[in-house]
Amino acid sequence: MPIHPNTRTAVSKLAIPSPIKKYFLDEEWEIDLSNNTNPYSEKFSEYPDVHQYNLKNLYLSRISPLSVSADPSSQQYPPLTPDNILFTVGSMEGIDILLKTFCEPNKDTICILHPAFSAYEHWGLIHNLEVKNIPLVGENLNSFSLADVVKINPKMIWVCNPNNPTSTMLKRDVIEQLCVSIDGFVVVDEAYIEFTDQPSSLAYLNKYKNLIILRTFSKAWGLAGVRCGIIIADPLVIHTLRYVQLPYGVSSPTQELVNQCLSHPEKTFESWQRIKKERENMMDALSTLGAVERVFKSETNFILVVLKDSRRVIKLLKEHRIKVLDCSTSIPSSIRVSVGTEDENRKFMEVMRKASGL
């Protein structure tokens, strides 16, 4: 398979790293004496599986019912296959290798719908790219000027959807408009998609070749310590990323733990419902408090709260050893609050009531 035509010039001159390339040849070996590993070691003596076909198929089998139930129209496009998937060392590696593979340093521009996850700008600056922030506007910070994006025509635009830190979500037809309006890639980070009942952009994946979706096992799947993310894209994009990805980065223990989680997902699915229920209860309760100016409607496992006096409330929370994220630099006087366990949420609300004089 050739590499993607929009690949960086430097990458287009590379070959797939030789430790990986040999696994993609149509050859089967009875004995492999090429790895220089210790033949007397046990479970993890061999390098990790780089095909991961079984794991990819298992992941697709878990997300397909969720996607179809949220969006019946997803059935009209060709189904996703393992060739659409690349596992990464968390979403951070996904961000890094996408920029490293397709964006020319000191030349290309990326756009970010802002405020958003800070890693997009961080890695964009590391790779010497021009970063343009397109402000999210509207009462719920869930719209933006498409014309401003088209005018810039970036090599890549980053869309966190549902968004971090606002917890709100763009309408999916906006993603489609982006895909048809710019020449570059539209990267939709769906790290929190499992916590919303709104449809994913997955249905458009085999319709628009410039659409790339990021997922993670760190949030809804409860495997932050395992470090595994997912890039879902056109097979040509996935193939090209292999030229840049660190060989064997997704370790055998990581693959084993992800497999266990996907093989027995019942408790995980149940936890999503518990989190959604707690989220709704917290939003309702916070909306009644005098210390609170505004509660954003959340489509994630966290809530963005605008306070009347954020410094005082954060200080009070700190005194009770409760940590929240101060988002005042993005949205004035705001905090981001993760939905915890019932007991953790109860303790948080007790302090918030105290802050409101109750």
Image: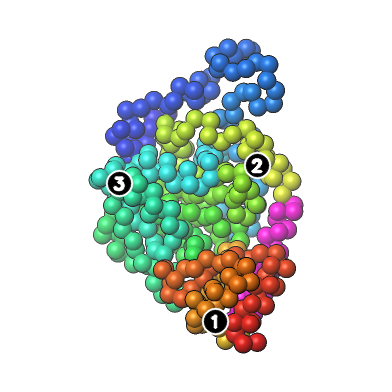
Residue 71 vs residue 36, the one in the foreground: 36
Q: What residue type is labelled 1?
A: Val
Residue that numbered label 1 is attached to: 292
- The quadrant of the rendering that contains the N terminus is top left
Point 33% across, 40% down: residue: 6
Residue 351 vs residue 56, the one in the foreground: 351
Residue that numbered label 3 is attached to: 128
Locate residue 353, reporting x and y percent. Answer: 64, 82
Regarding residue 233, the answer to whether it shows in the image is: no
> Considering the numbered disc 2 on the image, is that residue within a helix, a strand or a loop?
helix
Q: Which amino acid does label 3 sit on?
A: Asn
- State whether residue 253 is above or below residue 312: above
Point 25% across, 45% down: residue: 106
Residue that numbered label 2 is attached to: 258
- The stretch of residues the image draws in magenta is 266-287
Rendering quarter of residue 239 = top left
- State whether residue 319 is above or below residue 290: above
The answer to whether mark 3 and mark 1 are in CB contact below 8 A is no
